[in-house]
Amino acid sequence: VTIEPTSSTILVADDEPDIVALVSRRLRKSGFTVITAVDGEDALQKALARMPDLALLDVMMPLLSGVEVSRLLRAAPQTQAMPVILMSAGLLDLHIPDDADAFIAKPFGAFELPTLVLEVLARPLRRTLAPDQPPLL
Amino acid sequence: MTTEAGSSDDRKFLAPSSVTTPVARILIVDDNTSKRMALKAALAPLGHVIVEADSGVAALRRVMEDDFAVILMDVQMPEMNGFETVKLIRKRRQAEMTPIIFITSYTSEEIDQADHYAGGAVDFIFAPIPPPDLRAKVSFFAHTYLHAQRLAAQAEAVRMSVAQLQALTDSAPIGIYQTDAEHRYVYTNPRWSEITGIPAELAVGRAWSSVIKPEDGVCPEPDLSMVRTFTHRFEIQGYAPSRIGSITVQALPDRDGVAGGWVGTLADITAVTLAERALFEARDAALSASALQRNFAASASHELRTPTASIVGFLEEVLLSTTIDDEDRELLEVAYRNAQRLTMLIDDLMVLDQCEIGAPTMHLEPTPLGPLMERILSTFATAAEAGGVQLNRTCDGAAPPAMADPARLEQAIMNLVGNAIKFTPSGGSVTVDVSAGDEGQVHVSVTDTGMGIEPDDCAKIFERFYRSRGATDKAIPGSGLGLAIAKVMVEAQSGTVAVTSRPGLGSSFVVTLPSAGPRS
């Protein structure tokens, strides 16, 4: 399965405007459509309202951390299968939380991020909602 | 007579031939030798010791020498008759209570009995008397006498053990006391007074609460119906210097099983408690200092990496542009290289800091070393080729997996391999070898044919920021953190790193780790 970059929308959430600008620029250059969010709550709302193809979340954000947003996305039926990549400038997050699909440490190289995003999008959907499973949220 | 040995005392008295029968002394006083012989013969079956006296004077002498269970006294004797003898005997303290039986041929009417009973007689026997009657009477008195003797011995034993207990409590190195049911002191030992500063004579009779006030103001007087024992720590105040005591109290059940009082011990735990407190304070201070340091390092690292991520990222973006001229590109590349170097330095410091926190942050699991080494070497393939260094890998098939944190071990070995490649000139080689060590151990060695390390430097190369003379002389780049990181990482996994080197010929770093299983 090849993913057409142009057909995918990525949500980028980070409280550092410079990082948001850098990441957005790179993804746009690779052909993605980018939505941005400035904190965890903003990210959650935009993810639920706009249904991006993938959420790229900073771990340390105000209001809700990336890990918390990821967990909430998993709990909502409509976003349960949405791929999530966590990014952080800290090394303490070396171990990826179960809720996330991938982790990337800041700083990252110019092509590292678009490559990872494409790779995660190309994965078969990790989660499917069982028909008789009640919504968690 | 063994069958009677365990029977009642009364039975033993009636069993004269038994060796275990307690023996009483009986004094027979008569001036007539044949009458004495007859009495003695009649009493012989009782098995007691018969002592004879042929006159009142002789009787007095015997009484002074010995203690008798009963005295058989002839009334009619020359010089001093029986009544007169008894009067004198009664004056001897030793014999003032000894039962005396008069033997007489007078009829009862002839003797003013009331008088003589008052004079000390307990009974009269009128001769001639049938031997069984005599034995019955004498046996009764002997029995009574022996019983009294036994009671006296028991009383003495009790008195002795009380004295022993008293000596014990007096010299005990712990405070001992007893209170009655109303918590008034009945007894306190000298150590108790030493601890509390209260003399025993002041404590006895006073209530628990009036002598010692617990620090929290609550007197631990237990509900007698609820509690059998309790322990309480408290401060003894009002006496300088104030002490910290610990009492352990136990109920003394009375005959009905109800607590009729309490016995307790009082220990002076001032020194122990103060030492404990100091220890806890030191521990808390150390813990909060270490938590502070941990948080500081983590947030400092995070804060530093965020701007460097921007710098590196945006420089990259500019360098990707095709519109900048070559001179500007060169300058930007210097900036980019240094920004990357800064990033790595921050990473190294962070990693070092994390590892110093030690084992708790490690995720140990059985880690097969062969595949791990293969992965590491493939990472370095390009760098080795660029430097003209040959990479070799050997693996002892019997080597067990290591008990290690795979990610952290990988970083440690990578630092060693990277270091080895950096210090090995073109044409040399770096060999990574995995081998089984002693029981429960596995080795990973990284051997190069590089410049080697001077003996002086060998001890220092694991220090942070230390750079060997060889490295600085030849201007080989590096922060001096790589080996320090490798060492703390391996040590945090309960392993060791050792180095041997021959200057000019090469060095060998050996990592020893606990194995996760037996040799295969």
Image: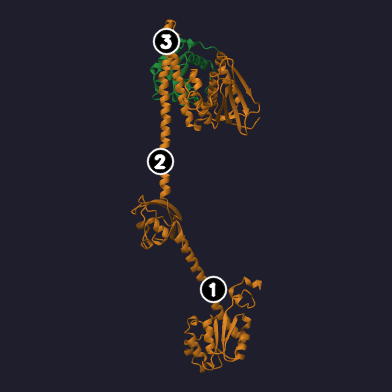
The hue in which chain B appears in the rendered picture of the protein: orange
The answer as to whether the residues below labels 1 and 2 share one chain is yes
Mark-to-mark CA distance, 1 and 2: 64 Å
- In the image, the chain rendered in green is A
Distance from disc 1 to disc 3, alpha carbons, whole Å, reads 116 Å
Q: Amino acid at mark 2?
A: Glu
| Residue B209 coordinates in the image, percent (x, y) | 36, 56
Q: Earlier in the sequence, mark 1 or mark 2?
A: 1
Q: In the image shown, does B425 or B228 lie closer to the viewer?
A: B425
Question: For the view shown, which residue lies furthest in the left direction?
Answer: B238
The chain under label 2 reads B
The answer to whether B171 is drawn above or below residue B39 in the figure is above
Image position, residue B82 (x, y; %): 52, 90
Q: Which of the numbered marks, if any, corresponds to residue B331?
A: 3
Which residue carries the number 2 mark?
Answer: B281
Residue B436 shown left or right of residue B275 in the figure: right
